[in-house]
Image (cartoon, rainbow, N blue to C red):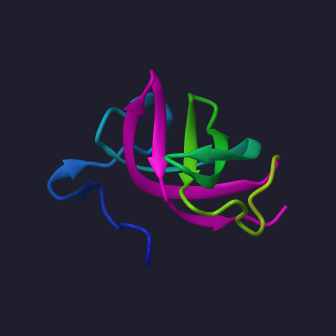
Amino acid sequence: MAFTDGDSWGGRPIARSLADAGHRQRVQVTGTVTSAATRRSHGVASLVCELSDGTGCVDLLFLGRPTVPGLTAGVRCTVEGTARREQSRLVVWNPIYQLHQR
Protein backbone atom coordinates (compact mmCIF):
# COMPACT_ATOMS: atom_id res chain seq x y z
CA MET A 1 0.00 0.00 0.00
CA ALA A 2 1.18 3.51 -0.74
CA PHE A 3 0.45 6.81 0.91
CA THR A 4 -2.34 8.93 -0.53
CA ASP A 5 -1.30 11.60 -3.00
CA GLY A 6 -3.25 14.84 -3.12
CA ASP A 7 -5.39 16.72 -0.66
CA SER A 8 -8.51 14.60 -0.71
CA TRP A 9 -9.57 11.01 -0.31
CA GLY A 10 -12.92 9.98 -1.70
CA GLY A 11 -13.78 13.65 -2.16
CA ARG A 12 -13.16 14.45 1.53
CA PRO A 13 -10.17 16.48 2.77
CA ILE A 14 -7.22 14.69 4.36
CA ALA A 15 -6.13 16.03 7.76
CA ARG A 16 -2.37 16.71 7.73
CA SER A 17 -2.25 17.58 11.45
CA LEU A 18 -3.99 15.98 14.40
CA ALA A 19 -5.50 19.33 15.39
CA ASP A 20 -7.46 19.19 12.12
CA ALA A 21 -8.49 15.52 12.43
CA GLY A 22 -12.06 14.52 13.15
CA HIS A 23 -14.20 11.41 13.48
CA ARG A 24 -14.18 9.25 10.34
CA GLN A 25 -11.68 11.52 8.59
CA ARG A 26 -8.65 10.37 6.66
CA VAL A 27 -5.39 11.49 8.29
CA GLN A 28 -1.82 11.56 7.09
CA VAL A 29 0.46 12.86 9.82
CA THR A 30 4.09 12.72 10.87
CA GLY A 31 4.99 12.63 14.52
CA THR A 32 6.81 10.86 17.33
CA VAL A 33 5.67 7.68 19.06
CA THR A 34 5.40 8.67 22.74
CA SER A 35 4.43 5.22 24.03
CA ALA A 36 3.98 1.68 22.78
CA ALA A 37 2.39 -1.18 24.71
CA THR A 38 0.75 -4.53 24.08
CA ARG A 39 -2.84 -4.67 25.33
CA ARG A 40 -5.84 -6.87 24.87
CA SER A 41 -8.18 -5.08 22.51
CA HIS A 42 -11.35 -6.58 21.13
CA GLY A 43 -10.31 -9.94 22.58
CA VAL A 44 -6.82 -10.19 21.02
CA ALA A 45 -3.32 -9.02 21.92
CA SER A 46 -2.71 -5.77 20.05
CA LEU A 47 -0.06 -3.08 19.89
CA VAL A 48 -1.24 0.38 20.89
CA CYS A 49 1.09 3.30 20.15
CA GLU A 50 0.44 6.92 20.99
CA LEU A 51 1.66 9.30 18.28
CA SER A 52 2.07 13.04 18.84
CA ASP A 53 2.58 15.55 16.04
CA GLY A 54 2.83 18.63 18.28
CA THR A 55 -0.81 19.60 17.65
CA GLY A 56 -2.45 16.56 19.23
CA CYS A 57 -2.23 12.84 19.88
CA VAL A 58 -3.67 9.75 18.25
CA ASP A 59 -3.67 6.11 19.29
CA LEU A 60 -2.47 3.72 16.61
CA LEU A 61 -4.10 0.32 17.10
CA PHE A 62 -2.50 -2.67 15.39
CA LEU A 63 -5.22 -5.22 16.02
CA GLY A 64 -3.93 -8.77 16.48
CA ARG A 65 -0.28 -7.71 16.35
CA PRO A 66 1.38 -7.63 19.78
CA THR A 67 4.51 -6.08 18.25
CA VAL A 68 5.42 -4.15 15.11
CA PRO A 69 9.15 -4.09 14.33
CA GLY A 70 10.59 -0.60 14.74
CA LEU A 71 7.53 1.00 16.34
CA THR A 72 8.85 1.93 19.76
CA ALA A 73 8.74 5.04 21.93
CA GLY A 74 10.87 7.83 20.49
CA VAL A 75 10.59 6.79 16.83
CA ARG A 76 9.40 9.32 14.24
CA CYS A 77 7.02 8.04 11.63
CA THR A 78 4.34 9.02 9.16
CA VAL A 79 0.98 7.27 9.41
CA GLU A 80 -2.10 7.21 7.25
CA GLY A 81 -5.54 5.85 7.97
CA THR A 82 -9.08 6.74 8.91
CA ALA A 83 -9.44 8.31 12.34
CA ARG A 84 -12.35 7.66 14.65
CA ARG A 85 -13.31 8.71 18.15
CA GLU A 86 -13.31 5.99 20.78
CA GLN A 87 -13.96 6.97 24.39
CA SER A 88 -13.01 10.60 23.62
CA ARG A 89 -9.67 9.58 22.05
CA LEU A 90 -8.69 9.72 18.40
CA VAL A 91 -7.77 6.22 17.13
CA VAL A 92 -6.53 4.87 13.80
CA TRP A 93 -6.84 1.12 13.35
CA ASN A 94 -4.09 -0.69 11.41
CA PRO A 95 -2.62 2.43 9.78
CA ILE A 96 -0.19 2.47 6.89
CA TYR A 97 3.10 3.60 8.42
CA GLN A 98 6.59 4.65 7.39
CA LEU A 99 9.44 4.82 9.89
CA HIS A 100 11.94 7.70 9.65
CA GLN A 101 15.62 7.28 10.34
CA ARG A 102 16.94 8.82 13.51
- Viewer-proximal residue among 48 and 40: 40
Rendered location of residue 17, percent (x, y)? 48, 39
Relative side of 14 to 48, left or right: left
Work out which quarter of the rendered image holds the C terminus and state it: bottom right
> What's the residue at 28%, 41% (across, down)?
24
Rendered location of residue 13, percent (x, y)? 25, 46
Rendered location of residue 33, percent (x, y)? 72, 46
> What's the residue at 48%, 40% (across, down)?
91
For the view shown, which residue lies furthest in the bottom direction?
1
For the view shown, which residue lies furthest in the front direction?
43
- Viewer-proximal residue among 89 and 76: 89
Task: Tell me, yes or no, whether the highlighted magenta stretch contains residue 75.
Answer: yes
**Image position of 66 with respect to 55: above or below:** below
Q: How many marks?
A: 0
Work out which quarter of the rendered image holds the N terminus and state it: bottom left
**Image position of 69 with respect to 11: above or below:** below
For the view shown, which residue lies furthest in the top direction?
88
> Which quarter of the figure has residue 52?
top right
Q: Which residues are magenta?
A: 74-102
Task: Tell me, yes or no, whether the highlighted magenta stretch contains residue 89.
Answer: yes
For the view shown, which residue lies furthest in the left direction?
11
Relative side of 45 to 1, left or right: right
> What's the residue at 80%, 54% (across, down)?
72
